[in-house]
Image (tube, rainbow, N blue to C red):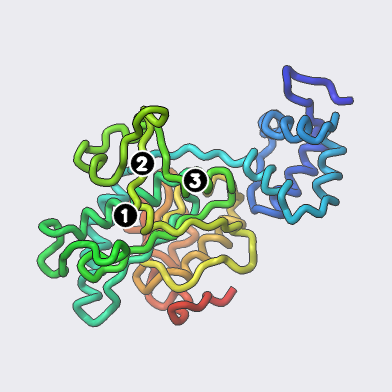
Amino acid sequence: MQPLVGSVVAMEMREFKGLRALIHRETGIWLKDGKQVMLASRLSKRLRYHGMNDFAAYAAYVEKVQDGGQELAEIINCVTTNKTSFFREMHHFDFLATTLVPHAGARALLGGPRSIRIWSAACSTGEEPYSIAISLLEALKPGRVPASLPAGPIQPVSFLGGWRIEVVASDIDTTVLATAAEGIYGEESLGDIPAAIQNKYFLRGKADMSGRVRVKNDLGQLIKFRRINLMDSQWALEGLFDAIFFRNALIYFNQDTQEIFLRKMLRYLNPGGYLVLGHSEHVPWLNDAAEAIGHTIHRLRAGHGAAPVLGSRPPQ
């Protein structure tokens, strides 16, 4: 039996390397040396759940169990970190209003689709995709739309003056996806969001829900949540996006895996579409396919991207 460190089962280096290889193979996530204690701490509860005494037995169980990937999903939920907030890195949401929406309007005037599609590719507990949808709705509302853009009320919910807004929100972690889809948050999570925006898009809880807020249905219906493991050969996506947000997630992956994921993501962008990364994520090796235009925003270069017919998947 492995010694306990508090309530944490000690993990030997060979056990760490074996579990690290399993996690990398299945998810692309790479745990650097030095993450041994962290991994032991987060997975000890899975040992206790199964009544096991050491990680060698647990690793053997994970490799052999036929449970439709449920235990692997539990590992992923334990390993991933999900720090996020509404309108985190506000300049990216300003960019949607000042650049992406006017460009979509110019495209529409030339006969293009009156639609905006954005993929939040590591959506965590949902604050990012809801922030994206609010930004688009506010940019397209009457009185705020540039003169070249048509305006009008939502008819139906997923249209704003004939504009269709769709935000696809994905994550590998099923626990955070459930939280995101539920759309319930602590009042404190709204932070410095202006009161008018809070009242417009959130309902405040009463009685046993006091201190919490829920996303209003008109906003929630713009978001499509789905589980996507970026290591899968086929992603559960159809059509192309005007922008892909993949922020503050590259830290989980080594550069080889980063490049595989990002170049594949570029194939899901409309011509001239945008890839948005986190504030500390710099990818100069992607410059041949996407131009860095500032604030870790990258614009797809002409001639890149698969540009499949809407409703089809880009070639894998």
Seen from this angle, which residue lies furthest top? 6
**Who comes first in sequence, dot 2 or dot 3?**
2
Distance in Å between CA atoms under marks 2 and 3: 11 Å
The residue wearing badge 3 is: 124
Q: Is residue 109 above or below residue 49?
A: below
Tag 1: amino acid: Asp
Identify the residue shown where x is 39% and y is 51%: 129
> Is residue 281 or residue 27 the one in the foreground?
27
In front: 44, or 204? 204
Question: Residue drawn 53% across and 46% down?
Answer: 178
Relative to residue 121, is residue 228 drawn left or right? Answer: right
> Which class describes the residues within 10 Å of circle 3: few (<14), some (14-19), or many (20+)?
many
**Residue, disc 2:** 86
Q: Earlier in the sequence, mark 3 or mark 1?
A: 3
Q: Give the distance between the C-alpha atoms of the residues marked 2 and 1, in whole angstroms.
A: 18 Å
Image location (x, y in percent) of residue 38: 66, 31
Q: Give the image location of residue 268, x and y in percent.
A: 46, 69
Q: Residue at x 59, y 41 (%)?
A: 80
Query: Residue 98, labelled with which disc?
Result: none
Residue at the far front in the pictured view: 207
Can you give x and y, in whole percent of width and height, for residue 232 in the image?
Answer: 64, 63
Q: Could you say whether the residue bearing mark 1 is in a helix, strand or loop?
A: helix
Q: CA distance from mark 3 to mark 1?
A: 21 Å
Query: Which numbered tag is attached to residue 218?
Result: 1
312 relative to 163 in the view: left or right = right
